[in-house]
Image (spheres, rainbow, N blue to C red):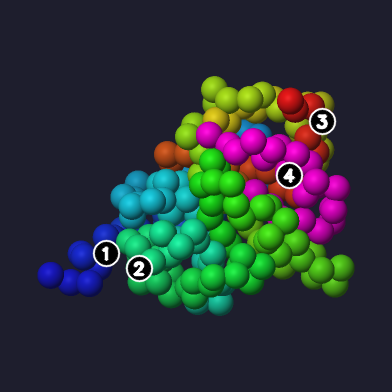
């Protein structure tokens, strides 16, 4: 039995699958609030949604530190990412290029992640928020680049105050983190430029 069999496979066709997933991720961030399926058909490790695992497998490598909640970092998800991406798993959210949180978890706050600097705003954290679903929750109205007028989304499984944190993140623009909300094999993009114009 090989190490990969014990951990679980990644992409069966890395070039083709990562290219398709990368295009979908770009589209999600270019068209905030629209649902995009990430192709790849991988079986994710325990604790990661398929879209989360696909995004990390596409974007992360040995030069991109990843932050995971301790239970994931020390379990199958951490082992899977170290094996397939060669990525360093960090314990400090502010050191992460990519990070994953459970949408219902009370912490870390979005402000705990790296918002970039005046010289390098593009070096901020990209945060993947795992949701219970990408619909059926509290409706919020978005505006900003990539949205013709406004767009309404209603992902479910998010902690109280989450949208206020997202609004505060936008106020720091051009600094701030970019977010991907994930469930099953799909994501919604919320780049730092997206404004929350109405929420409860």
* Mark 1 vs 2: CB contact within 8 A: yes
Give how far apart the Cα atoms at labels 4 and 3 are: 13 Å
- Label 4 residue SS: helix
| Residue in the picture at 21% in, 65% down | 6
- Label 3 residue SS: strand
Magenta highlight range = 157-179
- In this picture, residue 173 sits left or right of residue 28: right
In magenta segment, residue 52: no
**Mark number, residue 165:** 4
The residue pinned by badge 2 equals 79
The residue pinned by badge 1 equals 7
Mark 4 vs mark 1: which is more N-terminal?
Answer: 1
| Residue in the picture at 42% in, 46% down | 49
Marks 4 and 1: which is nearer the front? 4
Marks 4 and 2: which is nearer the front? 4
Give how far apart the Cα atoms at labels 3 and 2 are: 40 Å
Give how far apart the Cα atoms at labels 1 and 2 are: 7 Å
Where's the C terminus, which quadrant? top right
Give how far apart the Cα atoms at labels 4 and 2 are: 31 Å
The residue pinned by badge 3 equals 197
Give how far apart the Cα atoms at labels 3 and 1 are: 43 Å
* Mark 4 vs 1: CB contact within 8 A: no
Q: Where is residue 136 in the image (x, y as percent from the top left)?
A: 54, 22
Q: Position of residue 135 (x, y in %)?
A: 55, 26
């Amino acid at each position: 039995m090989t190490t990969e069999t014990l951990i679980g496979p990644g992409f069966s066709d890395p070039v083709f699958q990562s290219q398709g997933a990368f295009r979908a991720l770009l589209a999600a961030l270019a068209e905030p609030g629209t649902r995009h399926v990430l192709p790849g058909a991988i079986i994710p490790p325990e604790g990661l949604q398929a879209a989360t695992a696909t995004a990390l497998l596409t974007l992360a490598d040995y030069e991109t530190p990843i932050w995971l909640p301790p239970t994931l970092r020390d379990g199958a998800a951490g082992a899977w990412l170290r094996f397939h991406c060669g990525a360093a798993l960090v314990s400090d959210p502010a050191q992460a290029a990519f990070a994953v949180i459970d949408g219902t978890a009370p912490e870390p706050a979005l402000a705990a992640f790296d918002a970039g600097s005046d010289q390098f705003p593009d070096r901020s954290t990209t945060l993947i928020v795992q949701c219970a679903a990408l619909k059926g929750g509290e409706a919020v109205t978005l505006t900003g680049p990539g949205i013709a007028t406004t767009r309404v989304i209603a992902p479910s499984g998010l902690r109280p105050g989450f949208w206020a944190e997202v609004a505060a993140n936008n106020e720091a623009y051009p600094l701030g983190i970019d977010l991907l909300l994930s469930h099953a094999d799909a994501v919604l993009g919320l780049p730092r430029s997206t404004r929350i114009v109405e929420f409860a």
